[in-house]
Image (cartoon, coloured by chain):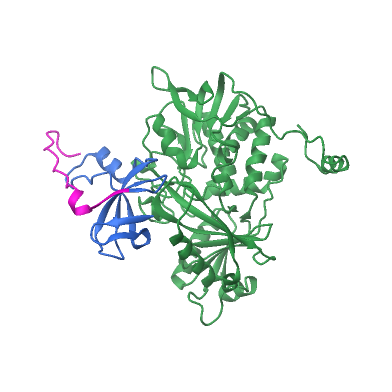
Chain colours: A blue, B green
């Protein structure tokens, strides 16, 4: 498996460390919805096919990357710098019923 | 169906081994069953066997998309043990080990269960304390276990690296005498034959492609590549594809599928008459009856359904083996293979009723599924037959994550690649 790092070019995957699924956005820290956090922490889409995941170029530029890769063929479709594609969650709208 | 015995082996041998029956039938699927088990590996077959034997439910089909025992049952390192510490796991794995003890006789099929012990090496005083805690908890639950010091280990496993140059000097070992190995294929075949003899239909080359639901949303049957089949209850035991099968029923599970490799060396004269795990890294080794040294270690780390591994893990694993047993450096290794592990978020399995009526889940075996085969089948059969778990699997539920009762033996958190 080879990953083309946006900074360093094509490198063997052994230079990278995987962190895991990048398809979910971490909820805002003020979000108190149980289901939102449960799904974020525990459930995974675990697709057989295209999977979006975080990799860290530990033995290279040390940048965090978002890699789209096939979990059956291990083909890498695309690599981007995480700071370019990860969006920050918005604060939840004020809950009229109050916090749980 | 022939009862296997000294007499049957001897008399068939005299007649040139002609006239052995098939070990199980190859039936066409019926239109409806009381219970359908999806997945004809060790766990699915064991479930069908215990449904018939313990609960008298014999109108059962096991649907397998490939051939029996062709998944992880045929791709593991065959180790059996019950040295688990966290409540929820301890008694479950002990039940499984107890079933292993009488398994060959129970099945009338030689599962080649060998209680050749397991040694968990430790390399520091703090590691010893951790193992002492775990083994003390086991002993307080009536499970055998001992702690050995360095001199005792040296006497029992003289081929480990005890030299002054050892990279990770052996401080001692925890030992479970009743642990050991079993013949993986024979386990699947024995359960298959036992289930078939009791009337279970084993249907191969039959892939489940969807679930039939009634108006209330309950599962009432399955769609397969060999037609639709009705069932009052459907249990899934499909290891690496648990996510995909559960998804057909609309369930989203706390599971990721990962790749685990295993290795066999060239056949060698008897060297390792037990199972040994390295404490300074993740490496375990035993020797098969054919002489090959069977070993394995960590997951490759990334999500995968590919059943084939990568070189970095091999490069990481072999030096660990050599650091533990220096004479391994002269052996060539012969085969490597990969299996797909359904890793849960706490490293412990799931055997329970699912939130969908009529559907039962047996999965999330991480990479400890083989040793659990009898216990898993036994508990899953109990859960399906009685619509409630046995006390041995009562804590191995799907909702434990939601309720904050994760059973995290390693303390790694919800990172499936780290368990």
Q: Is residue B250 left or right of residue B107?
A: left
Do we see residue B419 in this rendering? no
Q: B262 or B135, which lies in front?
A: B262
| Residue B67 seen anywhere in this rendered image of the structure | yes
| Residue situated in front as seen by the camera: A3 or B387 | A3
Magenta stretch?
A: A77-100
User: Which residue is found at the position 65% from the left and 49% from the top?
Assistant: B183
Q: Indicate whether residue A82 is drawn in magenta.
A: yes
Furthest residue toward front: A10
**Residue, far top:** B215
- Indicate whether residue B141 is drawn in magenta: no
Q: Is residue A67 left or right of residue B306?
A: left
**B341 or B56, nearer to the observer:** B341
For image coordinates 37% across by 48% down, the residue present is: A75
Relative to B227, say whether B325 is above or below: below
Which is the main secondary structure of the residues drawn in magenta?
loop
Give percent across and percent down for residue A56.
29, 58
Q: Quadrant of residue B398?
A: top left
Which quadrant is home to the N terminus of chain B?
top right
Residue A81 coordinates in the image, percent (x, y): 22, 54
Image coordinates of residue B182 in percent, x first then y, are 64, 51
On-image quarter of the C terminus of chain B: bottom left
**Residue, far bottom:** B164
Q: Position of residue B257 (x, y in %)?
A: 42, 45
For the image, the number of numbered tags is 0
Query: Viewer-proximal residue, B346 or B257?
Result: B257
């Amino acid at each position: 498996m080879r990953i083309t790092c946006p900074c360093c070019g094509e490198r063997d995957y052994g230079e990278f460390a995987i962190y895991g699924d990048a398809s979910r956005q971490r909820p805002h820290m003020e979000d108190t919805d149980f289901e939102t956090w449960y799904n974020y922490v525990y459930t995974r889409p675990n697709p057989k096919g295209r999977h979006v995941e975080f990799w860290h170029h530990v033995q290279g530029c040390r940048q965090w990357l978002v890699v789209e890769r096939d979990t059956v063929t291990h083909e890498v479709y695309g690599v981007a710098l995480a700071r370019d594609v990860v969006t920050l969650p918005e604060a939840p709208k004020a809950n009229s019923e109050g916090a749980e | 169906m022939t009862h296997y015995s000294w007499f049957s082996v001897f008399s068939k041998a005299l007649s040139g081994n002609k006239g052995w029956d098939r070990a199980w039938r190859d039936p066409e699927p019926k239109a409806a069953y009381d219970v359908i088990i999806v997945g004809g590996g060790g766990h699915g077959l064991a479930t069908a066997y215990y449904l018939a034997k313990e609960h008298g439910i014999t109108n059962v089909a096991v649907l397998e998309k490939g051939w029996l025992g062709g998944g992880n049952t045929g791709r593991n390192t065959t180790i059996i043990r019950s040295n688990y510490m966290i409540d929820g796991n301890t008694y479950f794995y002990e039940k499984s080990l107890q079933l292993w003890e009488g398994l060959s006789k129970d099945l009338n099929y030689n599962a080649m269960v060998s209680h050749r012990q397991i040694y968990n090496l430790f390399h520091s005083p703090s590691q010893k304390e951790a193992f002492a805690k775990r083994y003390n908890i086991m002993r307080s639950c009536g499970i055998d276990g001992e702690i050995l010091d360095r001199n005792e280990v040296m006497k029992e496993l003289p081929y480990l690296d005890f030299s002054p140059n050892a990279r990770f000097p052996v401080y001692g070992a925890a030992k479970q005498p009743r642990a050991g190995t079993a013949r993986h294929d024979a386990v699947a075949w024995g359960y298959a034959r036992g289930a078939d003899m009791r009337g279970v239909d084993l249907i191969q080359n039959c892939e489940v492609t969807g679930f039939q639901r009634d108006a209330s949303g309950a599962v009432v049957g399955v769609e397969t590549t060999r037609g639709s089949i009705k069932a009052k209850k459907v249990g899934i035991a499909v290891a690496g594809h648990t996510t995909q099968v559960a998804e057909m029923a609309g369930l989203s599970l706390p599971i990721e599928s990962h790749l685990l490799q295993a290795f066999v060396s060239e056949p060698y004269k008897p060297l390792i008459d037990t199972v040994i795990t390295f404490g300074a890294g993740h490496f375990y080794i035993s020797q098969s009856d054919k002489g090959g040294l069977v070993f394995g270690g960590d997951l490759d780390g990334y999500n995968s359904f590919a059943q084939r591994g990568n070189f970095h893990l091999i490069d990481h694993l072999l030096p660990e083996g050599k650091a533990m047993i220096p004479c391994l450096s002269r052996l060539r290794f012969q085969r490597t293979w990969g299996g797909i592990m359904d890793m849960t978020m706490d490293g412990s399995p799931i055997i329970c009723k699912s939130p969908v009526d009529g559907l039962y889940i047996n999965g999330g075996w991480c990479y400890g599924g083989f040793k659990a085969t009898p216990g898993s089948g036994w508990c899953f059969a109990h859960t399906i037959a009685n619509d409630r778990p046995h006390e041995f699997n009562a804590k191995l539920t799907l909702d434990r994550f939601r309720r904050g009762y994760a059973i995290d033996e390693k303390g790694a958190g919800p990172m499936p690649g780290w368990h």
